[in-house]
Image: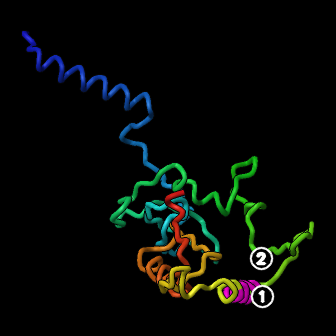
């Protein structure tokens, strides 16, 4: 029997594929048993990756108020489901793994407001209402004391050089637009974004 070169390659490929399948244990009579997924009963919500200014979409899986998994959003127009190494490790912002590989809440993650008074050495725990009120008062006081209506040449400038604004990669375009309008309304001219840093 004469075997052509094409038939020889086809038979060789079939034999190699079959032997690899047997070696790896993929026989036809075996049934594949699926394990329960960690995200099986979780609710999903979309968010933006907080690490840089690209704005990749992330799907967060939440169960009983806790994040149980994250992955790239395939419907997002920027990353189309792909994530860099930082975005892929987003789950580890809240959780770390113990020696047995079980996720535990990250003990270094801040979950409350810490305040250190000027010249103090210790941190105090404060509530969010106090923090927001204090920040608002300090912004208003700084703006009121440093606001310039005109410069030295008499040109109207309406600005405050003592304040600065840093945008967030965790916000979408519409949110950053509104924050930019707020910063301009306060007279802030030192405006930047974390994606440039």
Magenta residues span: 130-141
Instruction: Indicate the secondary structure of the residue bearing disc 2.
Output: strand
Could you say which quadrant of the image residue 113 lies in? bottom right
Residue under circle 2?
113
- Of 68 and 50, which appears nearest the observer? 50
x and y percent of residue 30 in the render? 43, 43
- Is 70 displayed left or right of 138 in the figure? left
Q: Which residue is outermost to the top?
A: 1
Image point (37%, 27%), residue name: 20
Q: Which residue is outermost to the front?
A: 153
Q: Are marks 1 and 2 in contact (CB under 8 Å)?
A: yes
Mark 2 crowd level (few <14, some 14–19, many ≥20, 10 Å Cα)? some
Could you say which quadrant of the image residue 177 lies in? bottom left
- Is 134 displayed left or right of 157 in the figure? right
- Of 109 and 161, which appears nearest the observer? 161
Mark 1–mark 2 Cα distance, whole angstroms, equals 9 Å
Image point (71%, 88%), residue name: 141
Residue under circle 1?
130
x and y percent of residue 159 in the render? 55, 82
Q: Which of marks 2 and 1 precedes in the sequence? A: 2
Indicate whether 42 appears above or below 149: above
State whether residue 132 appears in this view. Answer: no
């Amino acid at each position: 029997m004469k075997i052509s070169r094409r038939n020889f390659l086809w038979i060789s490929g079939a034999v190699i594929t079959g032997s690899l399948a047997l070696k790896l244990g993929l026989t036809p009579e075996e049934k594949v048993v699926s394990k329960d997924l960690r995200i099986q009963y979780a609710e999903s919500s979309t968010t933006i990756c907080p690490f840089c200014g690209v704005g990749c979409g992330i799907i967060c899986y939440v169960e009983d108020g806790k994040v149980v998994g994250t992955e790239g959003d395939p419907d997002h127009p920027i990353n189309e489901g792909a994530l860099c190494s930082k975005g892929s490790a987003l789950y580890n912002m809240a959780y770390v793994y113990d020696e047995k590989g079980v996720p535990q809440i990250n003990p270094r993650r801040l979950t409350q407001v810490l305040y250190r008074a000027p010249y103090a050495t210790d941190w105090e725990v404060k509530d969010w209402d106090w923090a927001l009120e204090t920040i608002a008062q300090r912004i208003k006081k700084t703006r009121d004391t440093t606001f310039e209506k005109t410069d030295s040449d008499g040109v109207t400038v309406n600005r405050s050089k003592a304040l600065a604004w840093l945008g967030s990669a965790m916000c979408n375009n519409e949110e950053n637009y509104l924050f930019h309008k707020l910063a301009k309304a306060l007279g802030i001219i030192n405006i930047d974004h974390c994606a440039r840093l």
